[in-house]
Image: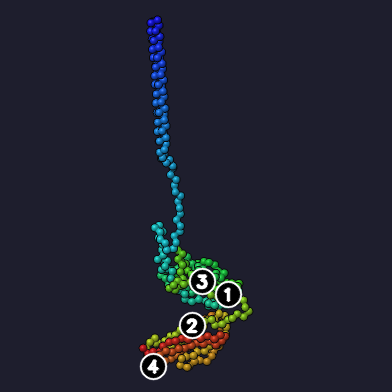
């Protein structure tokens, strides 16, 4: 019986040892699994941390910027690649108006063609060639073109006739057409110190008997000699330039501040034009010095007067 008890005890010890070994192996295996899981999670977390960093921008092939053409420089704006020649153009763009045909205010029937001529003098130091242009500037085109070439080469001090064939509009009214000259590099200039445009001003009337008349009187005075009272007689001359807008007949007379004057005279004008009349007044040393005047008076078809004042002195 004692042996049986020893056998049972020994068997119990062996079974317990086996159970403990099994539990130890299971614990070791569980620990191994837990370690692997922890390493996997750590690796995933590390991957996630790496993935949260901003990836470098992908390198793209360089795209060439399209070439852009520069806008055409405006007049007066200099560029590094295209210096302007405004100084030369300014020096070449100088002119004066010497005379003209078709007086301002001329009356035309609708649709009538006429030739306007301006005598333009080159007051610059340049030679104008036929690359210079006559360009429409403002107002009414009057049936003409916008641009014409200068008709001939014109040197400094020379005068060139600029003739344009124009047409009276179909509608009654007053019309003005303004023009300028242009250098080959597009510098536009007119006449006189202010580069004013040269122009024509007409009236269109469809009436059977248009109101032709004297439209203006302009006066001026000269003295010979210019100063002093030598020789004994001093000659003062007053000029009156009368402008008409068509064929007209008018009467006029002169009147002076000393009470002298002229008889009335009748004048017939065949077409729109200007005509100048003159009146002389002689003075001697014994004449009263001081302010004087001479008047040119039109009595018909309309009443008009132009008075020229001057001073007679023996200084």
The answer, for residue 122, to whether it is visible in the render is no
Q: Quick one: label 4 or label 3, which is nearer the N terminus? A: 3
Q: Which badge, 4 or 2, comes first in the chain's sequence?
A: 2
Q: CA distance from mark 2 to mark 1?
A: 25 Å
Q: Secondary structure at mark 2?
A: strand
Q: Residue at x 48, y 76 (%)?
A: 99
> Given contact means CB atoms under 8 Å apart, are the residues at marks 4 and 3 in contact?
no
Mark 4 lies on residue: 285
> What residue sits right under mark 2 in the picture?
218
Mark 4 to mark 1 CA distance (whole Å) = 54 Å
SS at circle 4: loop
Crowding at mark 4 (Cα within 10 Å: few <14, some 14-19, many 20+):
some
Find disc 1 in the rendering and name its residue: 173
- Residue 59 in the image: x percent, y percent? 42, 41
Residue at x 42% of width, y 71% of height: 124
Q: Earlier in the sequence, mark 4 or mark 1?
A: 1
Question: What residue would you read off at disc 3?
Answer: 178
Front position among marks 1 and 3: 1
State whether residue 209 appears in this view. yes
């Amino acid at each position: 019986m004692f042996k049986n008890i020893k056998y049972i005890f020994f068997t119990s010890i062996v079974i317990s040892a086996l159970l403990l070994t099994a539990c130890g192996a299971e614990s070791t295996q569980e620990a191994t699994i837990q370690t692997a899981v922890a390493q996997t999670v750590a690796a995933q977390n590390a991957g996630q941390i790496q993935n949260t960093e901003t990836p470098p921008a992908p390198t793209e092939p360089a795209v060439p910027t399209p070439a852009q053409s520069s806008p055409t420089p405006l007049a007066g704006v200099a560029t590094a690649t295209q210096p302007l020649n405004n100084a030369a153009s300014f020096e070449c763009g100088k002119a004066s108006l010497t005379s003209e045909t078709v007086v301002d205010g001329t009356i035309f029937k609708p649709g009538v063609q006429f030739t306007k001529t301006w005598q333009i003098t080159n007051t610059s130091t340049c030679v104008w060639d036929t690359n210079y242009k006559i360009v429409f500037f403002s107002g009414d085109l009057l049936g003409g073109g916008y641009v014409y070439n200068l008709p001939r080469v014109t040197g400094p001090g020379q005068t060139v006739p600029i003739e344009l064939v124009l047409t009276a509009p179909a509608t009654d009214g007053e019309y003005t057409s303004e023009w300028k000259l242009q250098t080959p590099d597009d510098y536009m200039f007119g006449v006189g110190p202010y580069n004013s445009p040269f122009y024509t001003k007409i009236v269109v009337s469809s009436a059977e008997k248009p109101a032709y008349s004297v439209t203006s009187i302009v006066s001026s005075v000269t003295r010979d000699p210019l100063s002093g009272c030598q020789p004994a007689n001093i000659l003062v001359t007053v000029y009156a330039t009368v402008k008409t807008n068509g064929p007209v007949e008018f009467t006029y007379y002169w009147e002076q501040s000393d009470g002298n004057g002229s008889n009335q005279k009748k004048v017939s004008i065949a077409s729109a034009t200007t005509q100048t009349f003159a009146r002389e007044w002689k003075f001697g040393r014994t004449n009263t010095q001081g302010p004087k005047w001479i008047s040119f008076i039109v009595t018909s078809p309309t009443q008009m007067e132009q008075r020229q004042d001057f001073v007679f002195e023996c200084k």
